[in-house]
Image: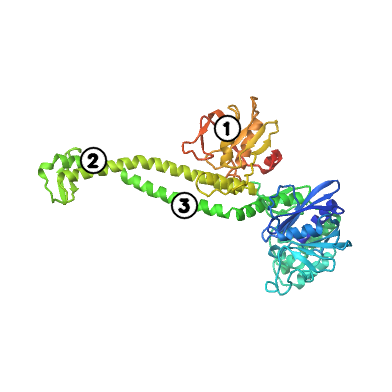
């Protein structure tokens, strides 16, 4: 994982410099394995997010809003009991392991001053957050580990807290390069990057690959294949890296792809990927981690909480798709209805030559040139006249079906389009209140029972609000109901409306107040529309825009669906940094 021991040591220094000496103000547990500790320090408030989730374990300061359950979990209540008002006296890293101990000075129930330890272990699926009493016993953990789960290191209340067994690896800050090379040569003969990973403490595979890339100039070698020049380069690189780490000369660095999507992070420049990934630097490690993990964490959290809605939408979409397929097949069959009318006419004109009991009539088709003979199947139980009426009835039924089927197919296609917009809403939801609004919307459309409990008021969410660099307010709907209200009711005729072309997304409105809108604001609004759409991860997104007076409600009457004409189209790239910079309420 990228959050290795060296990276954590840099983060430990940053955290210590900000909140050591501060006091715990509030503690929340927004997710099952995540806590947020709000602290007052250095004349300001700081929120420290600590996550022990198997997929995204980490800790860092965060400025992003967190949804908190109305009833705090038991671990959160226990943390509040022991640590609220406590003073943080030290943040200690255990060697170069991915373990930080937060030492809090507090007052126990007897009125004595004691030191409680919050052990944060960032170790993949074994990550944990453990509260340890002054006598070294476990008060509780966010993940309890029974002896059945781990014989080596159970973690349960009342048991002694035992550190993770240390691995016999070398600390690059202390071990001379010659000793590290000697350790590499005495170990198994494997690729240099893998040998470094086994020999050095606190290094991630990314850093080990970068060292090997620099030493072998991109040509992977085993340890035994290193020549004298490459060995000297390895010692020089390790010596330089050791000096930089001891001097604190590191830089929070994120690796992003061509579309700007975060891929990895570390504490130094990475060259092994060439131009495939670009290095983007940040001032603080917490800022980097907050940006890197926020989107992943939001997706994981919202996916858990919206799983029932996703299943409902998938089932509804599949049902409508099957119905549309059957209706299109029936419409295809009804396209040949004219021949039923022709058969009726031909039978009526040949009644004199037909008798009851006949199963086949062979008559001349005077509707075609040359009057070719045609065979018409008859029901022997009906008279010739009744057989003619039967074909007329089939014609009328097919004619009526075609008219109704076209309407039903249009409604079904609009319904699928609506489901796509709700899927997009779910994908971009970041708050529980946004999920509640989506449930209310589906309930109002008859797809779901009303989720609002009796006596409870639904929380009213405002649209996302941005401010362009030219000072124009830009509003963005969070869901289809809000899109409708914002576009069709609250906006003025000369406000400018934006939406991704044929792509599910939010309605975006530039509030003009009668002023002419500069091109820069139009471009920024288009970027906001592209970012708040299903094309967020794409490039060169087409965004249509027009005045509000040109937008009208869609005939299907589904929330969020509109028609607009005339319009112009802008091609933009979604830009998360621009959107966050312009945001005023998230």
**Image quarter for residue 193?**
bottom right
State the image coordinates of residue 52 (x, y, percent, origin top left): 71, 60
Residue 318, disc: 3
Q: Secondary structure at mark 1?
A: helix
Q: Which residue is mark 1?
A: 489
Compute the Cα span from label 2 to label 1. 50 Å
Of the 4 image quadrants, the one containing the N terminus is bottom right
Q: Quadrant of the C terminus?
A: top right
Of labels 2 and 1, the one closer to you: 1
Who is closer to the viewer here, 325 or 252? 325
Task: Return the x and y of residue 357 as percentages of the image width and height.
Answer: 13, 51
Separation (CA) of disc 3 from disc 2: 36 Å
Q: Classify 10 Å Cα crowding around label 3: few (below 14), some (14-19), many (20 and above).
A: few
Q: Secondary structure at mark 2?
A: helix
Viewer-closest of 563 and 35: 35
Residue at position x 50%, y 48% in the image: 447
Relative placement, left or right, of 55 versus 356 is: right
Residue topped by disc 2 = 341
Q: Can the viewer see residue 227 in this picture?
A: no
Q: Residue furthest left?
A: 352
553 or 259: nearer the eye?
Answer: 553
């Amino acid at each position: 994982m990228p959050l290795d021991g060296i990276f954590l040591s840099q983060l430990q220094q940053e955290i210590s410099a900000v909140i050591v000496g501060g006091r715990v103000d509030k503690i929340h547990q927004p997710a099952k394995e995540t806590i947020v500790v709000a602290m007052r320090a250095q004349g300001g408030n700081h929120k420290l997010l600590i996550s022990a989730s198997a997929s995204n374990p980490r800790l860092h300061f965060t400025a992003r809003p967190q949804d908190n359950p109305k009833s705090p979990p038991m671990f959160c209540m226990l943390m509040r009991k022991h640590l609220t008002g406590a003073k943080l006296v030290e943040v200690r890293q255990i060697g170069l392991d991915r373990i930080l101990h937060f030492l809090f000075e507090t007052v126990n129930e007897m009125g004595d001053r004691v030191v409680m330890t919050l052990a944060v272990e960032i170790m993949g699926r074994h990550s944990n957050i453990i509260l340890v009493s002054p006598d070294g016993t476990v008060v509780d953990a966010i993940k309890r580990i029974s002896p059945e789960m781990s014989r080596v290191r159970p973690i349960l209340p009342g048991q002694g807290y035992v550190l993770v067994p240390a691995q016999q690896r070398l600390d690059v800050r202390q071990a001379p390069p010659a000793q590290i090379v000697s350790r590499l040569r005495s170990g198994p003969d494997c690729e240099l990057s893998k040998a470094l990973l086994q020999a050095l403490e606190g290094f991630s595979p990314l850093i080990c690959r970068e060292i090997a890339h620099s030493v072998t100039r991109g040509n992977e070698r085993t340890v035994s294949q290193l020549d004298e020049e490459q060995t000297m380069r390895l010692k020089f690189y390790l010596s330089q890296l050791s000096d930089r780490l001891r001097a604190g000369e590191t830089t929070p660095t994120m690796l992003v792809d061509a579309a700007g999507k975060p891929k990895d992070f570390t504490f130094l420049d990475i060259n092994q990927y060439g131009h495939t990934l670009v290095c983007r630097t940040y001032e603080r490690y917490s800022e980097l981690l907050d940006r890197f993990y926020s989107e992943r964490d939001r997706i994981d959290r919202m996916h858990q909480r919206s799983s029932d809605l996703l299943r409902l939408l998938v089932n509804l979409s599949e049902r409508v798709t099957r119905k549309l397929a059957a209706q299109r097949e029936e419409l295809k069959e009804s396209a040949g209805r004219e021949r039923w009318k022709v058969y009726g006419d031909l039978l009526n004109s040949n009644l004199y030559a037909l008798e009851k009991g006949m199963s086949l009539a062979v008559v001349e088709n005077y509707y075609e040139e040359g009057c070719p003979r045609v065979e018409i199947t008859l029901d022997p139980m009906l008279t010739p006249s009744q057989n003619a009426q039967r074909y007329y009835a089939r014609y009328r039924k097919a004619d009526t079906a075609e008219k109704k089927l076209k309407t039903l197919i249009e409604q079904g296609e609009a319904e699928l389009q609506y489901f796509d917009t709700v899927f997009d809403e779910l994908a971009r939801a970041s708050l529980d209140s946004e999920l509640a609004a989506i449930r209310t919307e589906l309930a109002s459309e008859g797809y779901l029972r009303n989720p609002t409990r009796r006596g409870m008021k639904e929380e009213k969410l405002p649209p996302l609000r941005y401010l362009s660099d030219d000072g124009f307010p830009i509003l963005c709907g969070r869901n289809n109901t809000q899109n409708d209200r914002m576009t069709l009711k609250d906006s003025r005729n000369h406000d400018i409306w934006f939406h991704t072309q044929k792509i599910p997304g939010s309605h975006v409105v530039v509030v003009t107040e009668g002023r002419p809108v500069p091109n820069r604001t139009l471009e920024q609004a288009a970027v906001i529309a592209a970012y708040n759409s299903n094309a967020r991860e794409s490039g060169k997104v087409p965004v249509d825009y027009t005045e509000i007076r040109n937008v009208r409600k869609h005939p299907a009457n589904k929330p969020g669906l509109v028609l607009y004409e005339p319009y112009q189209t802008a091609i933009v790239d979604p830009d998360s940094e621009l959107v966050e910079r312009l945001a005023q309420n998230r």
